[in-house]
Amino acid sequence: MHPLSGRRDATAFHLEAGRLCVLASRHRQACIVVAREGIADLLDSHPSTDPVHLSVRAKFPDSWEANQIMLDKLAQQRVAA
């Protein structure tokens, strides 16, 4: 189950990039992601607010960006039920 599936808000807890890592890396045979509509809209209404510092490399991946990339990749394999 996608961590933002069915949510009305996107908190830092739910946007945590580590949750996507667990979602995509714990399978042994196949990975089926179950999600509800509206995740992209939720992300669009909650843009990244992390401060950007020039010439300073980020310590961790941007969670908002990681969620956007994951949705783009999953959309290529989408099956509506």
Image: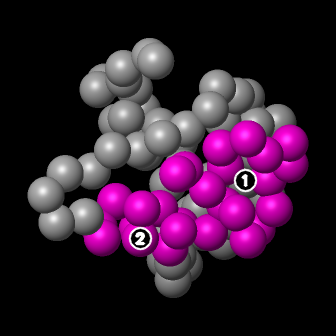
Q: Is residue 35 above or below residue 76?
A: below
Instruction: Count all numbered tags in the image, as a single digit.
Output: 2
User: Toward the viewer: 37 or 43?
Assistant: 37
* Residue 50 image position (x, y, % from top left): 74, 65
Q: Is residue 73 above or below residue 16?
A: above
Q: Which mark is residue 22?
A: 2
Single out the residue that lies furthest toward the bottom: 59
What residue is drawn where x is 66% and y is 61%?
A: 15
How packed mark 1 is, by other alpha carbons closer than 10 Å (few <14, some 14-19, many 20 or more), is few
Question: Label 1 is placed on what type of residue?
Answer: Ser
Question: Label 2 is placed on what type of residue?
Answer: Val
User: Residue 12 colored magenta?
Assistant: yes
Residue 11 appears anywhere in the view: yes
**Does residue 55 appear left or right of residue 37 in this picture?**
left
* Residue 7 image position (x, y, % from top left): 78, 46
Q: Is residue 4 above or below residue 50?
A: above
Secondary structure found at label 1: loop
Q: Earlier in the sequence, mark 2 or mark 1?
A: 2
What residue is drawn where x is 59% and y is 62%?
A: 63
* Quarter of the image where one finds residue 53: bottom right
Secondary structure found at label 2: helix
Q: How is the image coloured?
A: one colour
Single out the residue that lies furthest toward the top: 80
What residue is drawn where x is 48% and y is 41%?
A: 34
Magenta stretch, residue numbers: 1-26
* Residue matched to label 1: 48
* Eye-nearest disc, 2 or 1: 2
Single out the residue that lies furthest toward the front: 81
* Quarter of the image where one finds residue 74: top left
How packed mark 2 is, by other alpha carbons closer than 10 Å (few <14, some 14-19, many 20 or more), is few
What residue is drawn where x is 46% and y is 18%?
A: 81
* Residue 70 image position (x, y, % from top left): 43, 45
